[in-house]
Image: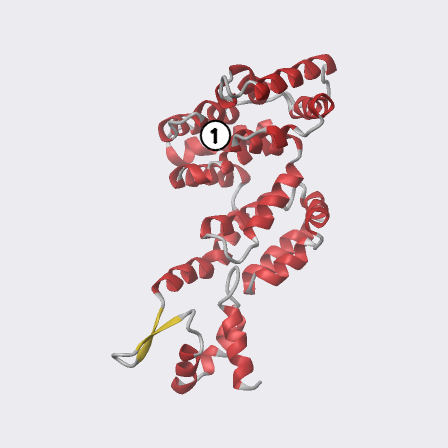
Amino acid sequence: MAFHQELEAITQAFSGHGVDEKSLVTLLGKWDHLERESFRKKTPHLFTEDHERHFQRWDDHHVRLLKHEFVRFKNAVVLWSMHPWERDARLVREALKKGQNAYGVLVEVACTRSSDELLGARKAYHSLFDHSIEEDVASHIHGTERKLLISLLSAYRYEGSKVKDDTAKSEAKILSNAIKNAHKKPINEDDEVIRILATRSKLHLQTVYKHYKEISGKNLDEDLDDLRLKETVQCFCIPQIYFSKVLNAALRIDVDKNTKKSLTRVIVTRADIDMKEIKTQYQNLYGVSLPQKVEEVARGNYKDFLLNLIVRGG
């Protein structure tokens, strides 16, 4: 391989989600000091030229980013190896530490797990942190989201097949009226809205979703301006579309490190659950297969591990 081809390969190894360890070992590891200098000079997005002192130094911001890329594979393996209860408990804890931009993870755990899985996560949280999830949510979150999130995370829903259609239709009307009157009373402060979302079974909420569209002509999540309520409805009623959108956002090159982490979280947590359905929805929404997109964007062992989990899901 000519040096210019090696240079391109190494540049690609540092670009994307994860790093291409094989290229770094086989190519970068054999370069002499002149070749490494040439690499530094030809990659100004990685290195800054100090003209006064005549050397090239790593861009500090890029070094910080690379630290995250090098551990992405390790983090995926650790997360995959965890008991699902521990995994969800740690995801909740991390989201609480990160703040408001990460609270969608709380919704995701509360609304896409079964009642027993959510109860298990709460038990694991006790074991790991000597607090309850509800207690930590209450102490970390002080805005209007707190009541909704505590209610969602503390629920133990009915999971049977019976749904009272008349009740679902009535509650669809309640939601419709609450949205119409949101200028008078914020919908995220409406006790009836929170009651419906926090206590009803998933099958019941999916029936409400259907009736809402019959009433209003639009999907419920499309009419909700509040982000947490929108995420809640999507996780309950159209979870595969929700996860497809999270994955697509995470697979962009120019996103922040926290958004990138969603790629690991979603693929690891859904590989044994509904990955086949997520792949179908992703293809429908974006016109490209999920494995193909991961192949384009991810690198090295991290890419191979994610693709194995995606294939495992059917």
User: Measured along the vertical axis of the image, is residue 263 above or below residue 99?
Assistant: below
42 vs 260: above or below? below
| Rendering coords of residue 67 (x, y %) | 41, 60
User: Mark 1 = which residue?
Assistant: 123
Pointer 1 local density, CA inside 10 Å: few below 14, some 14–19, many at least 20 = some
**Residue 144, position as x, y percentages in the image:** 43, 25
Instruction: Decide which of 255, 305 is in the foreground and name it.
Output: 255
Q: Nearer the viewer, residue 208 or 94?
A: 208
Q: Residue lying farthest left?
A: 52
For the point 46% across and 82% down, which residue is it? 30
Q: Is residue 75 left or right of residue 174?
A: left
Colour theme: secondary structure
Does residue 61 appear to the left or right of 147 in the view shown? left
Outermost residue toward the front? 183
Q: Give the residue displayed 66% in from the left and 40% down from the top.
A: 240
Q: Position of residue 128 (x, y in %)?
A: 41, 36
The kind of residue tagged 1 is Lys
* Quarter containing the N terminus: bottom right
Q: Position of residue 16 (x, y in %)?
A: 53, 62
User: Compared with residue 167, is residue 207 higher up or lower down, i.e. above or below?
Assistant: below
Tag 1's secondary structure? helix
